[in-house]
Image: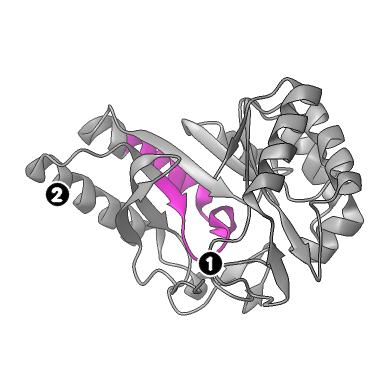
Amino acid sequence: MKKICLQSNIIYGPIASRRLGNSLGINLLPTEFKLCSLDCTYCQYGYTQHKVFDRIPSDYVPAMKLVVKEVEHALKQYIASETKLDYLTFAGNGEPTLHPNFPELVSAIVELRDKYLPDVKTAILSNASRVSDASIRAALMRLDKRFMKLDAGDGKTFKEINNPHEKVSYSSLVKALSSMRPLILQTMLVDGCACNSDDDHIDLLIDQYKKIQPIAIQIYSLDREPANASLVKVPQERLLAISRRIERETAIPVDIF
């Protein structure tokens, strides 16, 4: 397993995604360092250099006008090349919703999509840490798909695995997710120095899945070198057993990635 490098531009890809087909990434975050509200032990980009939650310095992130310009340029290129594109996906070097102009950017990019490539869907990969903010939640609902993270069934495990900023409340996060439908939940399962994959932790996760009621759940384990090298990958057989149990107890479809 290898860590991956930070995205070096606003636009990256397209990536042949198992979840989203041919997906063009949009990075609203710095290219020199990871900016996130969590510092997950398993992150493929390594540890978070700047853990923040609000009041992001404007010089940390690309200006809104530049982002819109880059997205419009990319869409025009795809029209000219006639290359198939399935999704425009907010992701990148940390948590996309941290950009100070995230709601305005979602509006602008959805309008560009409608103008140039109306058949292309929009999506986000988010750690869900800011869904309790009403303006963020409203912006997220403008996207076609919302992939939101939930790696822990309780606050203690959330701190151990995700190491959140002090302003991120686990209970508020779960409550906000429960009010934002439809969405897809993604859960990274790990073992070793931190664990959320034994039966007791799965019990807790199932309780939260029942509260949130996502339309689907995606579970997976380590595929690249994690920030904490002491973490252990959960075997495929165990993932399969967990997926069957979640489906049986929640009636929510589960995919393994």
Question: Disc 2 and disc 1: Cα gap in Å?
Answer: 31 Å
Quarter of the image with the C terminus is: top right
Residue found 32% across the figure and 60% down from its top: 12
Q: Is residue 5 left or right of residue 232?
A: left
Farthest residue to the front: give it.
Answer: 237
- Marking on residue 224: 1
Q: Position of residue 15 (x, y in %)?
A: 33, 52
Does the segment drawn in magenta span residue 107? Answer: yes
> Which mark is nearer the camera, 2 or 1?
1
Give the SS element for disc 1: loop
Q: Position of residue 10 (x, y in %)?
A: 35, 62
Q: If you read the primary sequence from the N terminus, does the residue marked by circle 2 or circle 1 appear first?
A: 2
Give the SS element for disc 2: helix
The quarter of the displayed image where residue 217 is located: top right
Farthest residue to the top: give it.
Answer: 251
- Marking on residue 76: none
Residue found 56% across the figure and 31% down from its top: 141
